[in-house]
Amino acid sequence: NIIKEVHTIESRMSALEITAEGDRQTIEMLEQQLARNKQREEELKGDTEQRRQKIVDLRAEIDALHKRLEGSNEEMEAEKDKILGGLRSQKEDLLSEKNRQLDQLTEVREKNLQLHGQHQELLEQQRTKEAEVAKLD
């Protein structure tokens, strides 16, 4: 009986040793996996920090571009206003010149009408004189 129990105990010990060796190997494998996971975690933290910094840099660049664009828009608006002001001034000048020329044209027409009237009077006077001369002959 005792020998059986010894054999049973020895079998159990052998099984426990095998199990313990398996557990040690599993623990060792898990420790290696844990070390690899920690290393990967550190790498990912670095990548994440780089990405965060890249985002910060890009936001700063976008802000700078917005400010530059706003400045360009303001410059373009000022240039547009300057050009429109010049065009308005030219338009007013052209309208003034046109009105002056229309006034001159009206004066010339009135003078032409006067001259035409005078011409008609002179023709009438000439015909009258010619008729008087013809009577005298």
Image: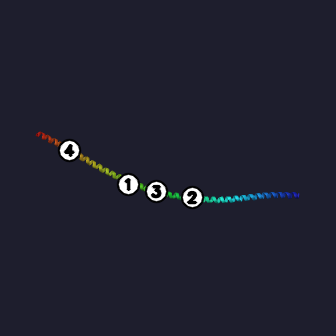
How far separated are the C-alphas under marks 1 and 4? Answer: 48 Å
Find residue 88 and report its horizontal and vertical position in percent.
37, 53
Q: Residue at x 16, y 42 (%)?
A: 126
How far separated are the C-alphas under marks 1 and 3? Answer: 21 Å
Identify the residue under disc 4: 119
Q: Residue most toward the right?
A: 1
Find residue 49 and report its horizontal and vertical position in percent.
60, 60
Q: Which residue is drawn at 62% across and 60% down?
A: 46
Find residue 105 and report its horizontal and vertical position in percent.
28, 48
> Is the residue marked by circle 1 packed among few (<14), some (14-19), or many (20+) residues within 10 Å?
few
Query: Which residue type does callout 2 highlight?
Result: Lys
39 lies left or right of 101: right
103 lies left or right of 44: left
Sequence order check, earlier mark of 3 and 2: 2
Query: Which residue type does callout 1 highlight?
Result: Gly
Label pair 1/3, CB-CB below 8 angstroms? no
Image quarter hosting the N terminus: bottom right
- Which of 88/39 is in front? 39
Identify the residue under disc 3: 72
Label pair 4/3, CB-CB below 8 angstroms? no
Sequence order check, earlier mark of 1 and 4: 1
Identify the residue under disc 1: 86
Identify the residue under disc 2: 54
Label pair 3/2, CB-CB below 8 angstroms? no
| Secondary structure category for the residue under label 4 | helix
